[in-house]
Image (cartoon, rainbow, N blue to C red):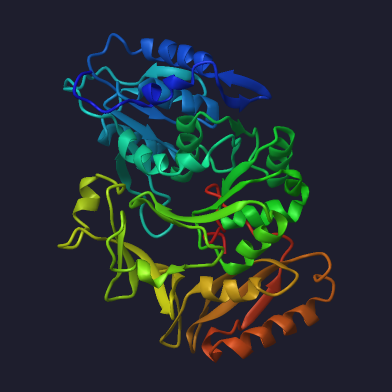
Amino acid sequence: MSNRQATFAECIQSHSGTPLLIHDKKLVYHDTLTAQALSLRANCSGDSSYSVALQTRDPYQLILGLVAMDGYAKKLLILPPCTPLETTAALFKQEQITHLLSQEGLRRITDENQQSRQDEATNWLFLTSGTTGDPKILSHTFSGLASKTASHVGHATDLRWGLAYQAHRFAGIQVILQALISGRPLVLPRSSDAAKMAEAFVEHKVTALSATPSQWRQLLSQGQIRQCELRQITLGGEIADQAILSALQRAFPESRIAHIYASTEAGVGFSVSDGLAGFPHKWLNTDRTVRMKQSSRGTLMLRGSARSNSNAIAAELDPEGYLDTGDSIEIEGERVYFLGRATGVINVGGNKVHPEEVERLVRALPGIQDARVTGKKNPIMGQIVALEVEASEQTSGDIETLKKKIRDHCRERLPNYKVPAMISVVPKLPVNDAGKLDRKTA
């Protein structure tokens, strides 16, 4: 393994004797994790080259697979456990996967042998969510993923992290690397239910937590999470509006709060920690680690070393090496704000409406826990704006009064075509497996 980058296992070896994970209420030390990783890797020791798919609901087992196989397997295909069988089979064939690590353990799934590795870095393959089209396979390396994480390690002194994201998601991997590379314990909750996660984080005294804005809204509505003495709060995966940033500042006034822009395609882009939604206008078109500009269609474009090294991404770069993220932005004075996905706009009589813009406005109202905007077919306008809101118990009693309050609030601040034509109050808005507001079930 000469002439190669340091592996995941090698990057955490300096934490010998340190508890790295809290799983099933047990402390897992570096030495135990390493010994188990070596045992797992030994099952592939007879193969000159192999590629492993990691498809498990157990976050500990997935972490073990990453530590064991990085630097030794040719590829690590990180799959959601719920991936359909026909999709899984096609991906295994496409990526020439030889072994599968699942709930049943590690097993060989093909008799075919791959070519020798020739000391290449392991490709970490992620499956995109497919929320804006068919899922794609995107490739990263450990060194590429860890390079951006390393810049945040300086803030990690004496922190205890909690894993709110699913471990197989890109954001989950970032939290895992953040904690383990810095040698800080990572709490792995046994459930993705907000109340049960909060219970685990409180019990194990988590002081650093990263989650989507939707997850944070759920956690704050439970109340129990406020018992954590959080010193580091991170938001990612969705637009962080001012309402959720301000709510977190009130709940945890001593905490450092940052919202991170990242995607599986672009890798980690940048983080904002000034307590405000959006990011400074001066960051556009300046010489930064990650360079940013606005495209002719109004979307954010990034150029940086953390992006996926997949051929599919290389084909999408502009002549200057920028990747179009597909996220629409708007410049207001000295601030740049995210409007939403360019592919998710609602067409109301030829006028474009970003669902996220209306949602942010509605969430700013007192008593509104969350909001979801969708487009409903209309024979005259093509589509109309439909709004669902999740309200607190104090405001959900008189539904008609609440609806009027929302409609009046929107009419005062939005052009008529953006004002919701339909408003409904629901007990709870769905959050998908990625921790984001579920727009597919609308």
- Residue at screen point 37% across, 22% down: 10
Determine which quarter of the picture holds residue 174. top left
Determine which quarter of the picture holds residue 327. bottom left
Q: Is residue 272 above or below residue 99?
A: below
- Along the viewing direction, whichever of 246 and 300 lies nearer the viewer: 246
Left/right of residue 24 with respect to residue 400 in the rendered view: left
The answer, for residue 80, to whether it is visible in the render is no
Quarter holding the N terminus?
A: top left
Left/right of residue 252 with respect to residue 66 in the rendered view: right
* Residue 300 image point, x, y percent: 34, 67
Left/right of residue 100 with respect to residue 220 in the rendered view: left
The image shows a total of numbered marks equal to: 0
- Along the viewing direction, whichever of 361 and 30 lies nearer the viewer: 30
* Residue 394 image point, x, y percent: 84, 68
Q: Is residue 328 above or below residue 209?
A: below
- Residue at screen point 24% across, 60% down: 322
- Along the viewing direction, whichever of 245 and 189 lies nearer the viewer: 245
Q: Is residue 355 above or below residue 244?
A: below
* Residue 236 image point, x, y percent: 50, 54
* Residue 442 image point, x, y percent: 57, 64
